[in-house]
Amino acid sequence: MARRVVIIGAGFGGIGAAIELRAHGYTDVVILDAASGIGGTWLANSYPGAACDVPSHLYSYSYAQRRNWSRLCSPQSEILDYLRTVAAEHGVAELVVPNTRVSECRWDDEARHWRIEAETDGEARTWTADAVVVATGQLAQPSIPNIAGREDFAGHTFHSAEWDHDHDLTGRRVAVIGTGASAVQFVPEIAPEVGRLSVFQRSGNWFLPRRNVPYPRPVRALLTLPYLQRIRRWGLKNIYLESLTAAIRTPRSFGWLISFRSKWFMRRQLRDPEVRRKVWPDYTFGCKRVLFSSYWLPALQRDNVEVITDSVERIEADGVRTADGALHRVDTIIWGTGFRTTQFMFPMEIHGRGGTSLRDAWSDGPHAHLGMTVPGFPSLFVLYGPNTNTSGGSIIVYLEAQARYVRTALEEADERGAAAVDVRADVEAEYDRDVQQRFRGTAWLACDSWYRDESGRIVTNWPGYMVEYEKATQRLDPSEYEFL
């Protein structure tokens, strides 16, 4: 059966899904993306020092390995070039319709297909599809806190995911609000050039070392050997990265050992006792995202850098006022406040069988079978959906598994002559209960984090290992689905 598939998002998930589908005979595929082209988060995030914190030999498709990465964890430009190259080599680059923002996906019960409403460069457009793959991810919508007086600031502001490269920071008084993964990368880059840098921190981070220097020539030569690369990738996946997940899952045993290493590293770097007092985390190792950097803590101890832990009360015309009454005068504010991770594809509207809204279906928090399928939304597949984020692994491993699962779902529908597949409500509910129970006793529940929604329920992360997820999604189980 010929099927039209509309993929929303041209990042690693969307490109990977298109490659998987076309390789197995599903050629009627289109990729819609709100941005100007391929790249997803790696197109949007071009701030100084932007890089992946997962080793490149694993943060890449298993079937499209590159042997010339410049360093362990490659910078944004290399990752973006890699994704564009892979898309072109597999013939999916031309499937992308850029500058296209999808406003609604609506299932037609009678016609048994999806209708997708969008705008391309301001012009209304409509697509119909037998299946929709939502690959917008969890790190697509910049988050800026609603701080009083934000609109009153007389200087220049921007979010790290929307970096203003035309704004020269040389000699300026700069405020960085937020100390998450992006700030940890760009602060050491801009600290030497600004006049004064005020870093506003809500909570400290746990760190593990990573210098991430370019590979020496002999190492680059060794990494071109195919057998060595396969061994290296296996080791990175099954030992190195899974060890961090193991630490988070077992905070009182193996987790204690890894946290000891983190403490030892941080104490060595934090020579200034006052800075150490301010930035030392007050929560269990692994509860929030563990960060890798050998440059962040030294940057905070520069003479022109100040760490401010008093909460931000309001923004005023000439600076940031904190709860202690102090006004920190700055002329530039950079928001390092991350993303609205629990929003997923919203504000896009999605309506399934009987006009049911996905917003209503998720009124008690996002949930999906295997993170991909939601009852009442036939042949709608969410990539990097609820409870599929990884605290220690590579999301590319998950995305490849999900693309394979989507393909097997369509093949199962083809074999049965069905128009669509819809996961059973009882199956999805039982799966969600099991996932939430697996968080018990882990570090993830030891504090508040961006992994949780407003109710405190963890809706972003997978509670297990990469290999477990790969096994669970190896092929669709027909007994778990209704075929329409």
Image (cartoon, rainbow, N blue to C red):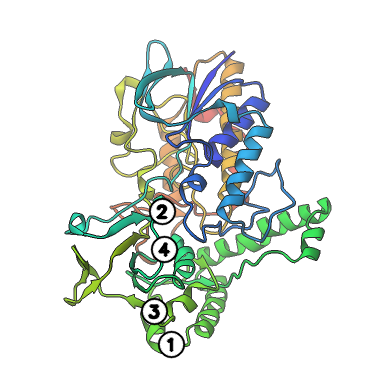
**What is the secondary structure assignment of the residue under circle 1?**
loop
Cα separation, mark 2 vs mark 1, equals: 34 Å
Front in this rendered view, residue 468 or 178: 178
Q: Residues within 10 Å of mark 1 (few under 14, many from 20)?
A: few
Q: Between disc 4 and disc 2, whose residue precedes?
A: 2
Q: Residues within 10 Å of mark 2 (few under 14, many from 20)?
A: few
The residue where tag 1 is placed is 272
Cα separation, mark 2 vs mark 3, equals: 23 Å
Please report contact status of discs 2 and 3: CB closer than 8 Å, yes or no: no
Q: Residues within 10 Å of mark 3 (few under 14, many from 20)?
A: some
The amino acid sitting under disc 1 is Asp
The residue where tag 3 is placed is 304
The residue where tag 2 is placed is 166
Quick check: can you spot residue 99? yes
Q: Nearer the viewer, mark 3 or mark 4?
A: 3
The residue where tag 4 is placed is 180
* Residue name at image x 62 percent, y 66 percent: 212
* Residue name at image x 51 percent, y 30 percent: 480
